[in-house]
């Protein structure tokens, strides 16, 4: 789960800016991962971007309004009116769901735990770029991107790594966060004191893959011996509206890539259970990607399966989609469907190998000279918003600044 300043309309339409993106795209495809050709920043910050979640019951309404007003997720007629109407209709139900998991979302707690563990490792493994400091920038709740950028400017940070905590890229998640980041930095940092680089996707990183495999293996071992080798593994990811998929958003392929690598690692460990990829959390009036997780559980129950292992493959920390939707809501569906062993792989949360993965990903980005992923600069083949084009051009310009600062040839 995501408008363009009128003064930027000409920029987004300009041929020179488009050419910049193309030149940067062509120069970014062959980055030497072993050599840091750019000068190291004096003060480095790491912005951990995610959707966020309500801290308390009183935050639920604004959280939902912000989501349904985000045109990177849903494009509705009279969005500010219709989106708010949809959100307000869901407030009572969603408040009840959060009450069942403790009253609010734990995502901020887990993000801060992960951030602290990450920078502690970086201070040891990359002391020349330390001390490192992380910041939390949520899209729909506090602490938001405004708060994070204000704090970074106050702290005298010079270079920020915008580190998406969505390991698979979608324009409706990471893309939405980047669009918001562009708007915020333009307003708060008009002189561009902050240099930006980006870690926008990392769904097949070996240490992430191993972390997921650890969590799945733990649950496979809990199955009774007669079901241990035959129980289906259902990888469940947040669904997308089909109009987002149809424009060529890479999320579906990238989630599938994560699943493929995790399954390969499981096979290496001798775990050969069958598996499927399913999709959860569809809301609102649009058609969403399927098969839906709930329908899959019912289907396997009716087919005679009595055990399932669920894996939240697009989430790295616990929040409402894992604690309520998978554990409680779908747990009840499983029970009603005759599934007696319904297990869920624990979210990565504070799993030490996962914290190490985060630090490793950042260090690799630093050591490679803060490269911009060429995928981030490639537009979807379908129609995209002017804001997305403008943001992509800004990202390309950040790469140009880095090259110029290093004394290299500007892309």
Image (tube, grey):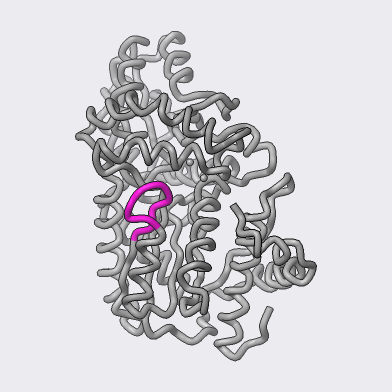
| Front-most of residues 49 and 258 | 49
Residue drawn at the location 57% of the way across and 74% of the way down: 398
Q: Residue furthest right?
A: 15
Residue 20 spot, x, y in % from top left = 72, 72
Name which quarter of the figure residue 298 lies in.
Answer: top left
- Residue 98 can be seen, yes or no: yes
Q: Position of residue 82 (x, y in %)?
A: 54, 30
Image quarter where the C terminus lies is: bottom right
Q: Residue furthest bottom?
A: 407
Quadrant of res 156: bottom left
In this rendering, the count of numbered labels is: 0
- Residue 32 in the image: above or below residue 7: below
Is residue 34 in view? no
* Residue at 32 percent of width and 77 percent of height: 155
Q: Is residue 138 magenta?
A: yes
Q: Is residue 101 above or below residue 295?
A: below
Up the image or down, 120 lies above or below 272; here it is below
Q: Main secondary structure of the magenta part?
A: loop
Q: Position of residue 407 (x, y in %)?
A: 59, 91
Q: Tell me, yes or no, whether the highlighted magenta stretch contains residue 47.
A: no
In the rendered image, residue 300, in percent from the top left (x then y), is placed at 45, 15
Q: Give the extent of the magenta segment.
A: 136-144
Which residue shows up at 38% across the image and 85% down it? 42
146 displayed left or right of 178: left
**Residue 341 as seen in the image, left or right of residue 379:** left
In front: 67, or 294? 67
């Amino acid at each position: 789960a995501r408008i363009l300043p009128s003064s930027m309309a000409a920029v987004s339409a300009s041929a020179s800016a488009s050419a910049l993106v193309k030149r940067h795209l062509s120069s970014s495809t062959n980055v030497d991962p072993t050599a840091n050709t750019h000068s190291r920043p004096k003060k480095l910050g790491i912005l951990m971007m995610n959707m966020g979640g309500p801290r308390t019951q009183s935050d639920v309404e604004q959280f939902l309004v912000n989501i349904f007003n985000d045109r990177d997720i849903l494009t509705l007629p009279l969005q500010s009116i219709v989106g708010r109407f949809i959100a307000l209709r869901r407030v009572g139900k969603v408040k009840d769901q959060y009450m069942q998991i403790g009253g609010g979302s734990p995502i901020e707690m887990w993000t801060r735990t992960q951030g602290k563990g990450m920078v502690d490792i970086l201070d040891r493994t990359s002391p020349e770029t330390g001390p490192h400091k992380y910041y939390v920038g949520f899209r729909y709740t506090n602490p938001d991107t405004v708060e994070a950028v204000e704090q970074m400017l106050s702290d005298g940070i010079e270079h920020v790594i915008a580190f998406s905590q969505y390991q698979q890229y979608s324009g409706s998640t990471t893309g939405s966060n980047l669009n918001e980041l562009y708007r915020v930095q333009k307003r708060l940092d008009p002189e561009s004191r902050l240099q930006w680089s980006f870690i926008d996707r990392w769904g097949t990183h070996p240490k992430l893959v191993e972390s997921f495999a650890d969590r799945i293996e733990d649950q496979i071992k809990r199955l009774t011996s007669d079901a241990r080798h035959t129980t289906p593994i259902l990888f469940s990811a947040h669904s997308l509206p089909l109009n987002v998929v149809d424009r060529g958003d890479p999320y579906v392929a990238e989630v599938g890539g994560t699943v493929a690598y995790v399954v390969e690692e499981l096979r290496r460990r001798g775990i050969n259970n069958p598996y499927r990829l399913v999709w959860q959390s569809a809301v609102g009036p649009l058609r969403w990607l399927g098969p839906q997780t709930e329908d899959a559980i019912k289907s396997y129950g009716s087919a005679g399966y009595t055990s399932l292992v669920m894996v939240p493959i697009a989430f790295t920390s616990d929040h409402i989609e894992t604690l309520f939707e998978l554990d409680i809501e779908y747990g009840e569906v499983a029970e009603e469907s005759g599934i007696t062993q319904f297990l869920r792989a624990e979210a990565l949360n504070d799993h030490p190998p996962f914290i190490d993965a985060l630090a490793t990903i950042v260090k690799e980005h630093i050591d490679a000279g803060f490269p911009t992923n060429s995928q981030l600069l490639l537009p979807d083949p379908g129609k995209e918003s002017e804001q997305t084009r403008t943001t992509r051009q800004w990202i390309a310009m950040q790469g140009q600044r880095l090259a110029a600062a290093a004394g290299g040839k500007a892309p």
